[in-house]
Amino acid sequence: MQTIMEKIKARDPEQKEFHQAVAEVVETVRPALDAHPEYRHQKVLERLVEPERIIMFRVPWMDDRGEPQVNRGFRIEMNSAIGPYKGGLRFHPSVNLSILKFLAFEQTFKNALTSLPLGGGKGGADFDPKGKTDNEVMRFCQSFMTELYRHIGPDTDVPAGDIGVGAREIGFLFGMYKRLRNEFTGVLTGKSLNWGGSLIRPEATGYGCVHFAAEMLAVGGDALAGKTCLVSGSGNVAQYTVEKLIDRGARVVTLSDSSGHICDEAGIDAQKLAFVMRLKNVQRGRIQEYADAYPGTVFTPVDPTRSSNPLWEHAADCAFPCATENEINGEDARHLVAGGVRLVVEGANMPTTPEGIDHFLDAGVLYAPGKAANAGGVAVSGLEMAQNSMRLHWPREEVEGRLQMIMKNIHKNCLAAAERYGSPGNYLVGANVAGFIKVVDAMLDQGLV
Ligand code: NDP
């Protein structure tokens, strides 16, 4: 396994995030490899870490001043052993091959955990929608799809949203796909309700995360009601995590964006959350404006000279990182534990560094990795695909009921896999091993392809 890591690093030395995601899986699936010698003989790990296909392309578009701009677009088709490639598109200036390969790798295991027939993929562009007009975003999306449409399809590869890609972007992307292909199919998920979207898809990742947290606490006879929670981010995942936490009687005191975080000790209630949703989804404003609207709230700007994030220094019972990768490092993890946090549930993908994870596990914190806890989003995307294929639209209760059941099953399967492979109660081992076995068994059934 050391050789696998050495080979990956030698081949793509600059892909740090990808190395991090692979190392975590490689270290935790060792007992499954020992129990199944055929996995080693068939070189499943070596095959898993190599994407089936990578598409990289130029995205030229015209800004509002009439000046041509050029971005780089990507789609990583990682693994199709159990279904068509499935995973979001991210538009953010930091997007590169390393970040998308780590996301596509994680997505492969996450999708397997949902028990739906979904392979793993991820894509995006180094385009920053922040500060762009709707027309600029539309022109960018149209140009992006003008290349991407050749590679995707409802039975081939079905992208969705991620950071920087919400309902507006999915609409522009879908419109262009439909025009180019002259077909109305479920080629993207996260569509609006009146043209093929599923109820509960916008809520799914955040809601699913909170369902997962509730399951974890229930094992010890505990519940979320009355718990103080720290949430980071203020986008799709953060918003609906907060909504469900409020529903369950928890007190959420923080939110953030890339400029800083707010702390509202009075608690973010439904009315304040509606303000955040308007601010972020319609006005596209900054989280600092929350502090202007609700006196008593403290806004702390990001300080680039600091090595830790002050958001994680507030006293609390639970933490839900819902912004981005590596937002909790070892120092942040120490602050969280010192501040009383006993439950960490990842809404974002890989938000905790390996040092942070080790600290949580050593301190006995209940820790859920993103690939299990945030799988509700892709699960409801899978349900959106099912509804699109059947030309049906399920009611809210049906989708929400299925989401809850899927999260319950993921929780149960993680615990069972952790127990079976010698790490009882360890959700990291459970999620990695359960996802890994499902994917590699399918790969072995299908031969060396
Ligand atoms: P959004 O774009 O809706 O929101 C992202 C939030 O995180 C914003 O508040 C943004 O602030 C903040 N953020 C992004 N990058 C950084 C950064 N480098 N530093 C500090 N803050 C940052 O994205 P989502 O809510 O959809 O995604 C959040 C996380 O959840 C990601 O890790 C994503 O991969 C993961 N995820 C999303 C799913 C989904 O269904 N949407 C499904 C599963 C996982 P700002 O606006 O200032 O950039």
Image: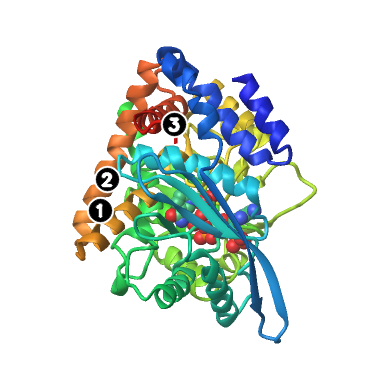
Quadrant in which residue 219 is drawn: top left
Work out whether residue 84 or residue 129 is closer to the camera in this orientation and state it.
84
Is 61 rendered above or below residue 356?
below
Q: Which residue is mark 2?
A: 404
In the rendering, at what x and y percent does residue 124 appear? 56, 59
Quadrant in which residue 263 is drawn: bottom right
Residue in the image at 42% along x and 17% along y: 38
Where is the N terminus found, in terms of image quarters? top right
Three-letter amino acid code at the position of disc 2: Gln
Q: Label 2 to label 3, Cα distance in Å?
A: 36 Å
Q: How is the image coloured?
A: rainbow
Residue contact between numbered discs 1 and 2, judged by CB atoms under 8 Å = yes
The mark closer to the camera, 2 or 3, is 3
Q: Residues within 10 Å of mark 1 (few under 14, many from 20)?
A: many
Residue in the image at 76% along x and 45% along y: 306
Q: Is residue 355 left or right of residue 155?
A: right
What's the mark number on residue 178? Answer: none
Q: For the residue labelled by badge 1, is the local secondary structure a helix, a strand or a loop?
A: helix
Q: Which residue is mark 3?
A: 448
Q: For the residue labelled by badge 3, is the local secondary structure a helix, a strand or a loop?
A: loop
Three-letter amino acid code at the position of disc 3: Leu
| CB at disc 2 and ligand 1 closer than 8 Å | no
In the rendering, at what x and y percent does residue 294 appear? 54, 66
Is 83 rendered above or below residue 37?
below
Q: Is residue 249 left or right of residue 128?
A: left
Q: Label 1 to label 3, Cα distance in Å?
A: 39 Å
Query: How many callouts does the rendering have?
Result: 3
In the rendering, at what x and y percent does residue 446 appear? 36, 33
Q: Which residue is mark 1?
A: 400
In the rendering, at what x and y percent does residue 332 appear? 64, 37
